[in-house]
Amino acid sequence: MINDPIVSEIRQIRQAYAATFNNDLHAICEDLRYQERQSGRVFRTPAREGEESRTRAPTGTRAGVPTHDGRETSG
């Protein structure tokens, strides 16, 4: 297997990001949702079979969950 430096760098970034949240998947997903809300972009959730797609605008905050830089939010 060839050692691709770009893939290695992405894996290191991913591992460092996960370590910020003690590899807690719930906290990682919460942070990603927070980043989506902070971006100001509108996101569409693809429709499941038999449903209509949903559009969600960025709203809300999260309290007590570390941000991507390790700080905890308040509120």
Image: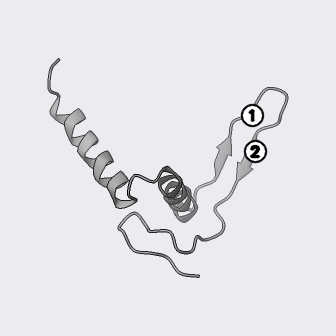
Give the residue displayed 14% in from the left and 26% down from the top.
3
Q: Is 74 left, or right, of 66 in this rendering?
A: right
In the displayed structure, 4 sits above or below 8; it is above
Q: Residue at x 76, y 39 (%)?
A: 53
Q: Residue at x 56, y 56 (%)?
A: 33
In the displayed orientation, state which residue is furthest to the bottom.
75
- Residue found 68% across the figure and 42% down from its top: 45
Examine the image and state in which quarter residue 4 appears: top left
Question: Could you say where residue 49 lies in the image, as x and y percent from the top left?
Answer: 79, 26
> Which residue was labeled with disc 1?
47
> In this figure, which colouring scheme has been used for the structure?
one colour
Label 1, residues with CA under 10 Å away: few <14, some 14-19, many ≥20 = few
Q: Position of residue 67 (x, y in %)?
A: 43, 67
In the picture shown, does residue 41 fall above or below 74? above
Q: CA distance from mark 2 to mark 1?
A: 7 Å
Could you say whether the residue bearing mark 2 is in a helix, strand or loop?
strand
Locate the N terminus by quadrant: top left
Provide residue 6's location: percent of width, then percent of height: 21, 35
> Within 10 angstroms of label 2, few (less than 14), some, or many (20 or more) residues?
few
Q: Which comes before the other along the chain, label 2 or label 1?
A: 1
Residues marked 2 and 1 touching at CB (< 8 Å)? yes
Q: Which image quarter holds the C terminus? A: bottom right
Work out which residue is located at the far top of the displayed protein and give it. 1
* Total marks in image: 2
Q: Amino acid at mark 2?
A: Arg
Which amino acid, mark 1?
Answer: Ala
Residue identified by numbered label 2:
54
Q: Secondary structure beneath disc 1?
A: loop
Side of 17 relative to 66 (left or right): left
